[in-house]
Image: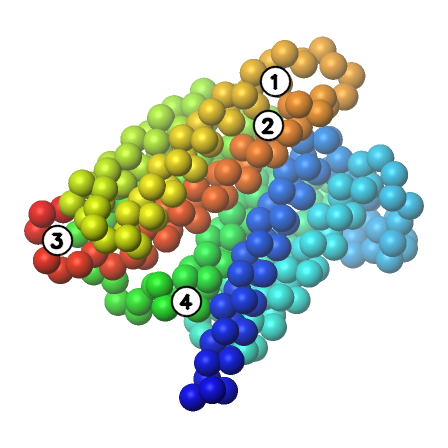
Amino acid sequence: MHLDYVGQFWVRRYTSVLAFCTLLLVVAGGLVTSNDAALSVPDWPLSWGRLIPVLEGGIRYEFAHRVLGLLVILLAGGLALRLRTALAWTALGTVLTQAALGGVLVRFLDPKAAAIAHAAIAQLFFGLTILLWLSARGAMPSRVSMASPIPVVAAVALFAQTILGAAVRHGVVGPAPHIAGAVAATGLVMWAAFPVLIHHMDNTALRRRAMLLLSITFSQVFLGIAAWMSRVANLDAPQPMPMMVLFTVAHVAAGSLAFGAALALAAAPVPREGMAAA
């Protein structure tokens, strides 16, 4: 019994570290894109033919992104070997796919489709780490009874928003689709969270997940507005301005957190006595 407790405690801490490092990886990727540092290191897997290049200019962001990526791969591999569950192996396969796409970006001079796919898979992997984190705490039962599929739809909408956001950052589409998607995703989040607060206010776990999703989503909207306004205000700037970089990276990070919160709400069991009411 004691050994089982120690093992569970270790897994809970380990999944927390993995999720946190994955969020840092998303932030590092946002810093690379926002600082126009993509392809500042023209080779892969080495960096300017060295394990550790001269850390100057955009190389700092690109190299930090690669180091964090390697760390996350090692953490995901260790967890997969420890748990040997389908979810853990799926997470490992996802992050390996993301790393391979990162190599494609370098080898083929940043093709837009691969860049967007790289960002989308990063968000998907972060979502998987949230599910692993919940599973390690027994907060995600193997069979979930939901009163409505809306939380799942909201999570899918938020994930689609991350893809549209990546397309905007890489100049594939204009901001209009992303703005329209933000309105739709926010509406779905409200549709998913408000019934929980109305019908299950006494359920602490459900209430916290719903409130967290709402607060992060609304913050995400305001960060998106700030990011766009700072970008417009600095269109003539010779290089990315710190305020624009700050808001853009915060917007990307909040998008990951909103997606994770939506998955957490979607994975939460709804008490059977409240299913009819919800």
Mark 3 or mark 1, which is nearer the start of the sequence?
A: 1
| Front of the two marks 3 and 2 | 3
Residue type at mark 2: give it: Phe
| Front of the two marks 4 and 2 | 4
Circle 3 is placed at which residue position?
274
Q: Residues within 10 Å of mark 2 (few under 14, many from 20)?
A: many
Residue type at mark 3: give it: Gly
Mark 2 or mark 3, which is nearer the start of the sequence?
A: 2
Q: Residues within 10 Å of mark 3 (few under 14, many from 20)?
A: few
| Front of the two marks 1 and 3 | 3
Q: Are marks 1 and 2 in contact (CB under 8 Å)?
A: yes
Question: Disc 4 and disc 2: Cα gap in Å?
Answer: 33 Å
Circle 2 is placed at which residue position?
247
Circle 4 is placed at which residue position?
137
Look at the image and tell me in which quarter the N terminus lies: bottom left
Question: Disc 3 and disc 2: Cα gap in Å?
Answer: 40 Å
At horizontal 52% and vertical 55% (from top left) the residue drawn is 125
Circle 1 is placed at which residue position?
230
Query: Which label was assigned to residue 239?
Result: none
Mark 4 or mark 3, which is nearer the start of the sequence?
A: 4
**Residue 63 appearing in the image:** yes
Whole-percent x and y of residue 70? 70, 60
Question: Disc 3 and disc 4: Cα gap in Å?
Answer: 23 Å
